Image (spheres, helix red, strand yellow):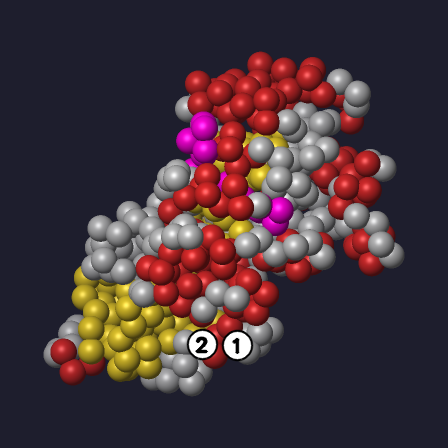
């Protein structure tokens, strides 16, 4: 199967194959070619360049991208799209002035979602998650990480992970599964947090590993949730069972989550709304990728993570959706591109790097996706006609993705 995209107004996000992440000023330096073409064979990019260099090419599928920008498909490295129901009641509470922690303290938030998930069937969860995933794919995502964490019992966590496995089997996107049993303390363990941590380590993680339904282990290490010491124990246990660490850190306070994540070799530490100068410096001296979630900051009225400062310090920042029912209900990566530019002061090019190659790096996948390179997967987005690359985040809220291409194949955009 050969795909040819021709007459591309601007081909953006060009990065050498050997580069696995873009750090600091490099995030603004991904190359662009105007009046370009791209050829992919069997899902892999084989050629690209100026139209004058194309010559005669036979192709099974030809896309005329005149007036359009083509760029790498988004890699969303943090989402929670398997859930039951919605939480617009809490939305009203937050409008009235309640904080995230106050909602959680009265038994809402994550526990609210856990109650609903326990009552939902696996089929109901799958159908709802599939609809959400398709919305994300049609907004330009080709790689998604999906977490458990609304189960909070062994049975319900495994139910979520089985749903994620079905998504992996049925969707054209690449789906990566993360076990997040330590998202909150289950209701049955109220007042017995240490017993719940023991359950996560001695019952949940072994069951997850035995069934082979997750690649990563995650912990909500933050004020009012899990301590750095508890997080360390869970990560150690997860690593023994072959689960690579990822961390929720510093959403509500500078909690020590960054440091414990670095210590245990976390692929990424995510949220970072309350990251301080020491957190940034510690990340600078590590291989752990800071992943910021501007949708959560926007929807939950939280501070925006200091992504500008992180890039200025030379870090490889990633951006992800955090799509979930309580604090970030949208998985629209184009909106995140706008928020990163408007609220975090990233350039359009820096934000695109954070949403693509660095998002892939936050999942350990950037060797074969996240950029335009000969040898990388042809996971691509074709925009609608636009005057420039910068117009894409500038015109926030406008639907500007015309076509998502995954593995060199156009997906159904209906």
Q: Is residue 269 magenta?
A: yes
How many other residues sit within 10 Å of disc 2, few (<14), some (14-19) or many (≥20)?
Answer: some
Q: What residue is disc 2 on?
A: 390
Count the labels in the image.
2
Q: Is residue 408 left or right of residue 359?
A: left
Which region shows up in magenta? Answer: 262-275
Please say if 138 is above or below 283. Answer: below
In the rendered image, residue 356, in percent from the top left (x then y), is placed at 40, 57
Q: Residue 118 at x, y = what percent?
A: 73, 33
| Residue ID for mark 1 | 394
The reply, left or right, for residue 237 in relation to residue 90 is: left
Name which quarter of the figure residue 22 lies in.
Answer: bottom left
Percent across and percent down for residue 407 are 33, 56
Task: Give the structural element (helix, strand or loop) at label 2.
Answer: loop
**Left or right: where 3 falls relative to 76:** left
Q: Are marks 1 and 2 in contact (CB under 8 Å)?
A: yes
Task: Tell me if I can see residue 42 in this picture.
Answer: no
Quick check: is 237 in the magenta stretch? no
Name the residue rendered at 57%, 69% in the picture.
342
Where does residue 242 sit, x and y in percent of width and height? 42, 24
Q: Does residue 236 appear anywhere in the picture?
A: yes
- Residue at x 31% of width, y 65% of height: 30
The vertical placement of 378 against 234, above or below, is below
**170 and 175: which one is in front?**
175
Q: Report the quarter where the N terminus lies.
A: bottom left
Q: Is residue 235 above or below residue 246?
A: above
Badge 1 local density, few (<14 within 10 Å), some, or many (20+)?
A: some
Q: Residue at x 40, y 67 (%)?
A: 349
Judge whether 47 appears above or below 126 on screen. Answer: below
């Amino acid at each position: 199967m050969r795909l040819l995209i021709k007459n591309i107004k601007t081909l953006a996000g060009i990065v050498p194959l050997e580069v696995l992440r873009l750090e600091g000023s490099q995030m603004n330096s991904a190359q662009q070619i105007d009046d370009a073409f791209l050829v992919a064979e069997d899902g892999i990019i084989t050629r690209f360049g100026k139209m004058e260099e194309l010559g005669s090419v036979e192709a099974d599928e030809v896309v005329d991208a005149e007036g359009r920008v083509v760029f790498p498909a988004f890699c969303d490295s943090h989402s929670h799209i398997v859930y039951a129901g919605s939480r617009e009641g809490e939305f009203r509470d937050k409008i009235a002035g309640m904080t995230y922690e106050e909602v959680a303290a009265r038994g809402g938030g994550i526990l609210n979602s856990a109650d609903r998930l326990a009552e939902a069937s696996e089929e109901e969860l799958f159908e709802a998650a599939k609809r959400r995933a398709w919305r994300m794919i049609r907004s330009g995502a080709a790689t998604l990480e999906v977490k458990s964490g609304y189960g909070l019992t062994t049975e319900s966590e495994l139910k979520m992970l089985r749903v994620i496995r079905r998504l992996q089997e049925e969707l054209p996107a690449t789906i990566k599964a993360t076990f997040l049993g330590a998202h909150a303390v289950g209701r049955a363990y109220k007042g017995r947090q240490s017993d719940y941590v023991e359950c996560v380590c001695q019952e949940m993680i072994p069951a997850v590993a035995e069934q082979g339904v997750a690649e990563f282990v995650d912990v909500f290490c933050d004020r009012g949730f899990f301590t750095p010491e508890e997080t360390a124990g869970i990560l150690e246990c997860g690593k023994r069972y072959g689960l690579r660490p990822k961390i929720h850190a510093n959403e509500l306070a500078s909690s020590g989550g960054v440091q414990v994540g670095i210590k245990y070799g976390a692929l990424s530490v995510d949220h970072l709304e309350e990251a301080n100068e020491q957190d940034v410096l510690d990340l600078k001296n590590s291989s752990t990728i800071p992943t910021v979630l501007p949708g959560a900051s926007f929807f939950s009225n939280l501070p925006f993570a200091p992504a500008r400062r992180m890039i200025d310090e030379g870090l490889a920042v990633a951006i992800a959706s955090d799509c979930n029912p309580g604090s970030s209900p949208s998985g629209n990566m184009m909106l995140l591109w706008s928020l990163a530019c408007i609220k975090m002061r990233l350039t359009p090019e820096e934000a695109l790097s954070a949403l693509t190659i660095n998002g892939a790096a936050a999942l350990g996948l950037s060797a074969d996706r996240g950029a335009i390179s000969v040898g990388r997967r042809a996971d691509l987005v074709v925009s609608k006609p636009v005057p420039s690359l910068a117009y894409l985040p500038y015109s926030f809220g406008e639907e500007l993705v015309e076509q998502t291409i995954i593995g060199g194949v156009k997906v159904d955009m209906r």
